[in-house]
Image (cartoon, grey):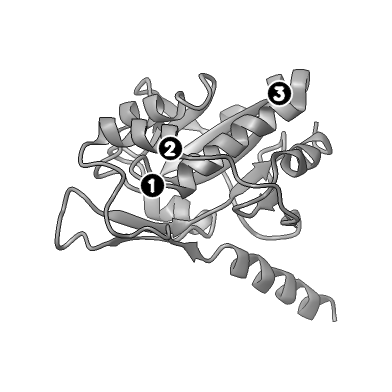
Amino acid sequence: MQTAKHLMLGAAALALLAACQPKDKAAPAASAPASATQTSASAAKPAAKSNVKSVDMRKEDIGGDFAMTDGDGKEFKLSNMKGKVVILSFGYTHCPDVCPTELLTQADTLKQLGDKAKDVKVVFASVDPERDTPELVGKYVKQFNPDFIGLSVTEGQSLPVIKQQYRVVSAKINADKDPKNYLVDHTAGSYVIDKDGEVAFFEPYGSAPENIAADIKTLL
């Protein structure tokens, strides 16, 4: 019975982690990365309040340490964040709606936390390293909050391994038609990682900032 229950919880979590795709697939936010980041950030609106529930992941075999490169060109390791609660999400800078909406939600979450926000780090990892250099991702996330950390992989770092660790899926759409301007179908939502570096909650796309903040407060 215990095994069956655990498998059911795992299946439910995987269902929530299924790939999401922006509704507007006609074209990316803009033809050039710089203008794309500005358009996405300014046009997006915070997710509407909802009754979306988080998923407790503390009994799931998911997550772990990883290495990527931040906007300053320095190696980032999740293990260096121990002592902080981390909100981790995956996406890309050309994303027309899902990613900027999530980042706005995370910015609002920090506001909900008030003084406790000093113990929380928001990390955004790119699934589109072909276009997203560490410098670009770093600048992109700081449009939402100057303390946000943007990451991309560089030589010697493995995005497929990281995606496997966090059950993230991503795939280019129509890249064969236009190698520079394409969308990426990718997992939406974010993880809340506790002070010991363990995944505690999965916050599905559409979660309200106050609900995410409430989960984070249980870990502070």
Question: How far apart are the two marked residues, 2 and 3, measured between alpha carbons?
Answer: 26 Å
Residue 40 circle label: none
Position in image of residue 58 (x %, y %): 75, 54
Position in image of residue 146 (x %, y %): 51, 19
Task: Mark 1 vs mark 3: give the one in front.
Answer: 1
Question: Which of disc 1 and disc 2 is earlier in sequence?
Answer: 2
Image point (58%, 51%), residue name: 189
Task: Mark 2 vs mark 1: give the one in front.
Answer: 2
Image point (21%, 37%), residue name: 32
Vertical side of 160 occupied by 133: above or below: above
Q: Quadrant of the N terminus?
A: bottom right
| SS label for mark 1 | loop
Q: Which residue is mark 1?
A: 96
Task: Mark 2 vs mark 3: give the one in front.
Answer: 2
Image point (84%, 76%), residue name: 2
| Position of residue 33 in the picture relative to residue 65 (left or right) | left
| Residue 84 visible in the current orientation | no
Position in image of residue 152 (x %, y %): 37, 37
Instruction: Judge the density around disc 2: few (<14), some (14-19), many (≥20) Cα neighbours within 10 Å.
Output: few
Q: Which residue is mark 2?
A: 43
| SS label for mark 3 | helix
Q: Which residue is mark 3?
A: 117
> Which quadrant of the view contains residue 172?
bottom left
| Residue 111 visible in the current orientation | yes
